[in-house]
């Protein structure tokens, strides 16, 4: 453990390059006094090549960094290094027929590995530069490349890498191969997770404008038409007009909320795009909150059709606390989240919630009744 810590310290602080890590298992020969009695030529301890463990650590950190920041530079470096090792191994097998590949090699297929690194970088470049039209294509290629590497890593000699790449696969399973609506929201979430608030606000707002352009059956690439959506959003936000006058294929209440959401994003987006050079600029902490709130509202409006008969259902809010919502809070829940019904805890459950014994180490059994109430009363798409 100390060796690995020192290795990474030296690589980062001293810019050292690691060639290999070997361990001589001297202890198999016995204790020190016994070994002194063994002739030197017979003191043959096995030597293990541990370099692959460092490689595995690097891949783990590389995937973690990508998921946390979107930065694919570590993966790119590791890919080049791994590809060289694979090519050297292939050359050895050509010159020495029948010789096994180097067991330290993590992957078998350099093409799949290079494709994965390239598609990871490409997706993040698309997000960083807000290339909205390219998001679904970039996601589709990345999902395909991840699957190929996951399948290959699972059959390779170092199988611990498979679940590491699997974490990457799990994150991108939330995206769609062909659904722009899903990918806009998931990309906004990616931006929120990775601190790219400017990109997130831009992609989400422009994606919602494109969504409405499609509802109006107009060209999403016509600047004038897109500007009209913003104008309509402003007028509906100010309640000068109602979305019902446009006769688009959306329920009136939902259309009004969507137009208002689009316009409400203009203020934080302009603030951050103008670098705060304006009167009353927002604090940096406001932007992640704004993006997070807007994503939640967009989900509630656009994801409704993923649930059976959602258009005909009430959207409930389950109130799991001991106080009353104010009229203002109820109004905000109706406008921002589309809530049509508020469900409070029943009297017996409320007594349980407000009288939790302080000496309990585990609340799971104590709260069983409340969990059952949530399962019984709640439906997909409800809020709590």
Image (cartoon, helix red, strand yellow):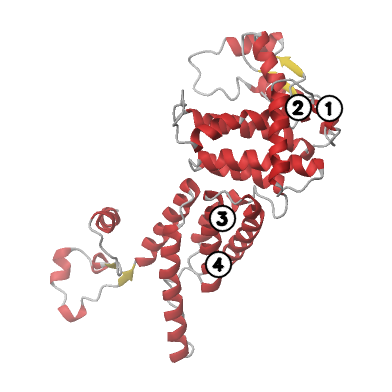
Q: CA distance from mark 3 to mark 2?
A: 33 Å
Which secondary structure, mark 2? helix
Q: Image height check: is 67 above or below 358? A: below
Q: Tell me which corner region of the image, top left, top right, bottom left or bottom right, holds residue 105.
A: bottom left
Depth check, mark 3 against mark 2: the one in front is: 2
Mark nearest the camera among 3 and 4 is 3
- Residue at position x 46%, y 47% in the image: 69
Location of mark 3 (residue): 123
Distance of mark 3 from mark 4, alpha carbons?
12 Å
Q: Position of residue 48 (x, y in %)?
A: 32, 70
Q: Earlier in the sequence, mark 4 or mark 2?
A: 4
Q: Which residue is mark 2?
A: 256
In the image, residue 327 sits, relative to residue 174, either above or below, namely above
SS for dot 3: helix
Q: Quadrant of residue 152?
A: bottom right
For label 4, the SS is helix
* Residue marked by disc 4: 115
Residue under label 1: 244
Is label 4 in contact with label 2 (beta carbons under 8 Å)? no
**Mark 1 or mark 3, which has the lower sequence index?**
3
Residue at position x 46%, y 50% in the image: 64
Q: CB of mark 3 within 8 Å of CB of mark 4?
A: no
What's the distance in space between the residues labelled 1 and 2, CA to CA?
A: 8 Å
């Amino acid at each position: 453990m100390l060796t690995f810590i020192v290795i990474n310290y030296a690589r980062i602080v001293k810019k050292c390059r690691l060639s290999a890590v070997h361990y001589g298992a001297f202890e198999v020969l016995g204790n020190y006094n016994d070994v002194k009695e063994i002739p030197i030529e017979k003191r043959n301890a096995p030597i293990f090549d541990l370099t692959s463990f460092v490689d595995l650590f690097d891949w783990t950190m590389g995937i973690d960094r990508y998921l946390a920041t979107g930065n694919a530079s570590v993966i790119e470096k590791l890919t080049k290094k791994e590809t060289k090792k694979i090519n050297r191994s292939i050359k050895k097998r050509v010159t020495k027929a029948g010789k096994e590949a180097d067991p330290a090699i993590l992957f078998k297929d350099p093409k799949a590995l290079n494709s994965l690194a390239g598609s990871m970088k490409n997706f993040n470049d698309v997000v960083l530069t807000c290339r909205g039209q390219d998001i679904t294509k970039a996601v589709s290629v990345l999902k395909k490349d991840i699957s190929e590497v996951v399948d290959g890593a699972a059959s390779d000699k170092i199988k611990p890498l498979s679940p590491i790449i699997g974490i990457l696969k799990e994150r991108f399973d939330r995206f769609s191969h062909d659904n722009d609506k899903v990918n806009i929201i998931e990309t906004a979430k990616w931006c929120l997770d990775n601190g790219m608030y400017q990109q997130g606000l831009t992609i989400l707002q422009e994606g919602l404008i494109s969504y409405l352009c499609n509802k109006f059956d107009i060209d999403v690439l016509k600047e004038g038409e897109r500007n009209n959506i913003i104008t309509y959003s402003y007028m509906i936000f100010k309640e000068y007009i109602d979305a019902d006058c446009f006769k688009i294929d959306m329920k009136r209440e939902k259309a009004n909320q969507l137009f208002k959401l689009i316009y409400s994003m203009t203020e934080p987006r302009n603030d951050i795009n103008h670098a705060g050079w304006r009167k009353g600029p927002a604090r940096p902490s406001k932007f992640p909150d704004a993006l997070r709130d807007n994503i939640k509202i967009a989900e509630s409006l656009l994801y409704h059709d993923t649930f059976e008969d959602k258009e005909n259902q009430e959207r409930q809010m389950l109130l799991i606390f001991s106080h009353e919502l104010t009229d203002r809070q109820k109004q905000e829940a109706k406008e921002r989240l589309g809530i049509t019904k508020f469900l409070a805890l029943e009297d017996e459950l409320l007594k349980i919630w407000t009288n939790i014994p302080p000496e309990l180490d585990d609340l799971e059994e104590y709260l069983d009744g409340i969990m059952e109430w949530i399962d019984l009363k709640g439906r997909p798409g409800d809020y709590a």
